[in-house]
Amino acid sequence: MNSEAYLKRQGWRGSGHSLDHRGTGIKKPLLISHKRDQLGLGKKSAAHNVSDQWWMRAFDESLKNVGSGNQSTLSQVRKTGINRGGLYGFFVRGEGLTGTISTTEESSAAEASLTNTSTPPSRTSTPPTSTVESPDESDSASESPQDTDSASEASASSDAMSESAPEVGQPASSSKKRKRTDEGLDTIKKKRKEFQKEARAIVKRQRTEAQHEKALAKGQIKHVPAQETSTMRLIDIEVQALIKQRKARGEFQPVIGDGGKESKKDKFARQKALRDAKSSIKKALIEKALAQGELPNLNNYTATDILENYEYESGMQTKQKKQEKQRLKDLKAENRAYKQAQKKLQKAERRAEKLKQVRETAEKVKAARNQKHGAHEAVASEDIILLPSQKKVPHYGYVDKYPSKAEKRARKEAVQAEAAAQQLLQEKVAAKLANLSDKERVQYQSRADLKSQSIEEYVLRRIQKKDEKRAEAAGEKAPVTTTDSKLESENTPVAAEETKTEAVPPPLFFVDTEGDKTLAQNPTSLPIPLPDPKRPVKSLTKEERKARLQHMREQRAKRKGLDISELSAAAPPSRAARKNDARNRIVAQILLEQGIEKGATKEEREQARTLAKKRMKEEKKQKKVEEKAEKADRKQKGVRKKKRTWAGRNDSG
């Protein structure tokens, strides 16, 4: 078992930290080391089995001084720390940092800070276990001010951290993104402003320094002799110029060997010569500046000392610039991360607000329907409430999932089968009405009037009853002739088995005695308002596009002074429509020739239609032959006329 990993999962900060997360120290002494005597065999001494009794003595002294007002050793260590090292101090004082699992860098930094606070540089031994009077009654002059201050600061920081430390059972999340979103939108905005402000300050400082150095290099700014940095920068510029001139003369150039490149030995020698040349030139220029009084020398430094100090300071400045650059990079990265968290929170707020509006609208709709129709209508209206996650399919309605190809195909086949069944029924009704005599037609009409039906509806119902009786006699169910999905499902064997096995509750019906006027009207007959002109045309429905087109036609007619009735006239029939009309006329003519005026059966109509098609084909062929002959005749007449014209010209010539 890996005890260290187990303890870290429970909230332990790692080696050097307390196991107690409440900051009250340990419950029993743990630091008792068993020491063995190394004097050799056969020697008996009192120290052959010695134990470190520091803890036991400390507890004994604490018990003796209970109620006396004196400060025990344990209280002293807990407040001011211990000089022997961090080991005893950690276990006496309790945990110094929060008891949560964190990264290795944080724990190592915490260990370093605690070690620094608990281990002063004096390296003195452990204080005695004798009691010390309280600060109010005793003199604390024996302690040095430095030790007291450092110890008090350490205890204050540890107390503050222990107070704000969360429970071990609720460890902080390891996801930084989650932490950022948990901070809240206002805190994120505030932090982003702070990051942007600090980043702007760094960028402004960098830009100012770059502009100053650029102007100084160009000589646009006159240096002040009292400023050592400005003078040294001018010296650097002059050194670079002199080195550049010497390089142009051929010095410090790489020596190419036999292999086509410079050897390492020659390269190191050349680089060392370049560094020595720069250093000697700098020293000479510094001595010259000192002699002329341009470079202040308050401490009587030599040129070498001044050069070393300047190089150290320039190195520190370079390091500071790198740190600023890294800090700017970190600020930008943190700002981007907080920006993503802000976007996420704002998106969640917008979604919540939208969902709230949808729910409020749904509640208003339910309340209005409940007030108008009763409680049962409010329950039924829950199916009409549409959430943003639902999808709408054209000619189908709102669904939770788009239909697949198989579902679309099955739906299309069902519609086609229903249309075929309706067509067959209509043909049966037409055939029945055609075979009725005048007396039977009068009887059927009177019975239909009694039932408030048309004669076609009455005949259709009679046909359905006969089909049902035939099916009952044959032991089968009647064919389905309705579009009701419930009746269709009842005729399937699976649904029949389910109805046998499962107990279906009786249906509940409601009658609306008042009615709704808008339901009795055809939706297409209602006037469609003109859409907003700002909306794109592709987002409009067919009805809105039609209304928009009609409005534009009317406006154009008014502008040009045209008659609107001419624009709204129906378009001429198409070629297919004309062909259909011609075929229907030929079919009627064939039926009349056969002596059938009314009530033709389906087979008779099909035969007449076939004959009509043949006649139309023959007429078309005859028409083509006539047109071809007429065209050839016209062509022949044109040739004769042309020959006659040329002959007349020759005679006259």
Image (cartoon, grey):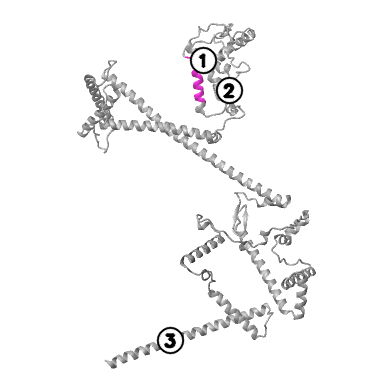
Rounded to the nearest angstrom, the CA distance separating label 1 from label 2 is 18 Å
Q: Residue furthest bottom?
A: 651
Examine the rendered structure and indicate whether residue 389 appears above or below residue 171.
below
Q: Secondary structure at mark 2?
A: helix
What's the residue at 52%, 83% (across, down)? 621
Q: Earlier in the sequence, mark 2 or mark 3?
A: 2
Residue beneath label 3, please?
632
Q: Picture coordinates of residue 246 (x, y %)?
A: 21, 31
Query: Residue 323 at what x, y percent from top left?
Result: 40, 29
Does label 1 or label 2 sit earlier along the sequence?
Answer: 1
Asked whether residue 294 is drawn in magenta, I would say: no
Position in image of residue 237 (x %, y %): 26, 29
| Res. 395 in view | yes
Q: Which span is picked out in magenta? A: 107-120
Q: Nearer the viewer, residue 132 or 637?
A: 637
Residue extending farthest to the right is: 473
Q: Residue at x 69, y 63 (%)?
A: 483
**Image x and y of residue 632, in percent:** 43, 86
Q: Identify whether 571 is placed above or below 117.
A: below
Q: 371 or 253, which is in the foreground?
A: 371
Look at the image and tell me whether residue 180 can be seen: no
Kindly identify which residue carries mark 2: 163
Q: Disc 2 and disc 3: Cα gap in Å?
A: 114 Å
Q: In front: 103, or 408?
A: 408
- Marking on residue 249: none
Inspect the image, locate mark 3, and give the three-letter code of the amino acid beneath it. Answer: Ala
Q: Which residue is mark 1?
A: 151
Q: How far, Cα to Cα, is label 3 from label 1?
A: 125 Å
